[in-house]
Image: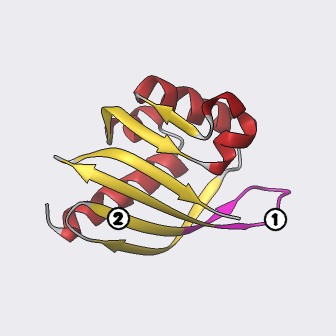
Amino acid sequence: MQPRDIEYIAIKWFEAFNAKKLDKLLDLYADDAEHFSPKLKIRKPETNGLVKGRAALHEWWEDAFDRLPTLYYRVTTLTANEDRVFMEYVRKVQGEEDMLVAEVLEVKEGKIVFSRVYHS
């Protein structure tokens, strides 16, 4: 894929996430996709920060959307190559301090196969 195609996936990802359209968000992922997040380590320690498969992703994000109805990501930078996009964004939740976040989406055959979140 071309970097612009990978970047387009990231744009669609933010659109679906911020609209809380879980089905559209999950459509961007391969069935066996994996997702790592420090927040997962805290909220679900048994995962050691890693969930696998679309069902686990669905459960994770549905919980986040239910707990944090004002959750919104403001994109600051997208940098893509042929198989991944590095995304920088600000995590915004009403009543919480903004958090700077970096996330990498690895893409194969047009679907996200792995995502990894970085923040302090």
Report if residue 93 lies within the magenta region: yes
Inspect this view and state whether residue 54 appears: yes
The secondary structure type at the circle numbered 1 is: loop
Q: Foreground residue, 65 or 86?
A: 86
Q: Position of residue 74 (x, y in %)?
A: 57, 66
Which stretch appears magenta? 89-100
Q: Which mark is residue 11?
A: none
| Left or right of 89 on screen, residue 9 | left
Q: Counting residues from the N terminus, which is met first, the one under dot 2 or under dot 1?
A: 2
Q: Amino acid at mark 1?
A: Glu
Q: Is residue 4 above or below residue 23?
A: below
The mark closer to the camera, 2 or 1, is 2
Residue underneath mark 2: 85
Quarter of the figure with the N terminus: bottom left
* Label 2 packing within 10 angstroms: few (<14), some (14-19), many (20+): many
| Left or right of 107 on screen, residue 99 | right
Q: Foreground residue, 94 or 55?
A: 55
Q: Amino acid at mark 2?
A: Val
Residue underneath mark 1: 97
**Mark 2 to mark 1 CA distance (whole Å):** 26 Å
